[in-house]
Amino acid sequence: EVQLVQSRAELKKPGEDLKISCKASGYSFTTYWIGWVRQIPGKGLEWLGIIYPGDSDTRYSPSFQGQVTISADNSINTAYLQWSRLEASDTAMYYCAKTSSDNWFDTWGQGTQVIVSS
Amino acid sequence: DIVMTQSPDSLAVSLGERATISCKSSRSVFYTSNTKNYLAWYQQKPGQPPKVLIYWASTRESGVPDRFSGSGSRTDFTLTISSLQPEDVAVYYCQQYHTSPWTFGQGTTVEIK
């Protein structure tokens, strides 16, 4: 069974750094894109970016370029989303999702809630 | 970026009636090389991650009830629920995967009238 299991919820202060994870199982990790999607409470889905673990090719939405970093560790089939300096506006649910062979998202993680508050 | 615009933002439909959601893209999401539209539809129920319903604009994902159908091409697309059931109450999103960033529509909330 294809599964994406995300790390637990986080409560952080503005200015802190954070790295959340998405562990994949049940498929060949290096041969499908993994993307990250943000959902602010009560709002819609926003595409942050994607990574192809096979060659680390990474694409970002211009809206999030420079704000987050996406990476992957193929040795443990895990993708990451990280921030160097969190802001209150980063408070949201973050989903990872695996693409199909043709790039729609066919499997989603359960989501990681990130709360940034002083 | 390709901007995806859904309408309406919300709709209330009686059980057993048809629900229709429109999605328009600011540029064509059709590739002439393979004659495919790079458009997917997702359903998100409260407290859950999204789930894909339709891809290639009209191909139903395995296990999705046949009351869900997708149509359209290039810049204009439609998701239709032919006979609304209680379990269809959700927010529905279209997404183009033609050009990075693979943008989503703003979502349409479907409720029971």
Image (spheres, coloured by chain):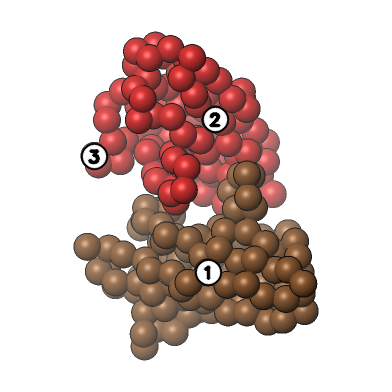
Chain colours: A brown, B red
Q: Which residue is mark 2?
A: B109
Q: Is residue B67 above or below residue B28?
A: above
At label 3, the amino acid type is Gly
Q: Residue at x 54, y 44 (%)?
A: B96
Q: Residue at x 36, y 88 (%)?
A: A75
Disc 3 from disc 1: Cα separation = 31 Å
- N-terminal label among 2 and 3: 3
Horizontal side of residue A44 vs B16, given as left or right: right
Q: Secondary structure at mark 2?
A: strand
Q: Residue at x 46, y 19 (%)?
A: B112
Q: What chain does mark 2 sit on? A: B
Mark number, residue A9 = 1
Disc 2 from disc 3: Cα separation = 22 Å
Horizontal side of residue A7 vs A40, given as left or right: left
At label 2, the amino acid type is Thr
Tag 3–tag 1 contact (CB < 8 Å): no
Q: Is residue A74 visible?
A: yes
Marks 2/3 same chain: yes
Question: x, y percentage for residue A37?
Answer: 56, 58
User: Where is residue A118, by image quadrant?
Assistant: bottom right
Horizontal side of residue A62 vs A79, given as left or right: right
Label 3 neighbourhood size at 10 Å, few (<14), some (14-19), many (20+)?
Answer: few
Q: Which residue is mark 3?
A: B63
Q: Nearer the viewer, residue A69 or A54?
A: A69
Q: Is residue A98 above or below residue A42?
A: below
Q: Secondary structure at mark 1?
A: loop
Q: Is residue A46 visible?
A: no
Observer-side mark, 2 or 3, equals 2
Question: x, y percentage for residue B80?
Answer: 42, 22
Q: Residue furthest front?
A: A118
At label 1, the amino acid type is Ala
Q: What chain does mark 3 sit on? A: B
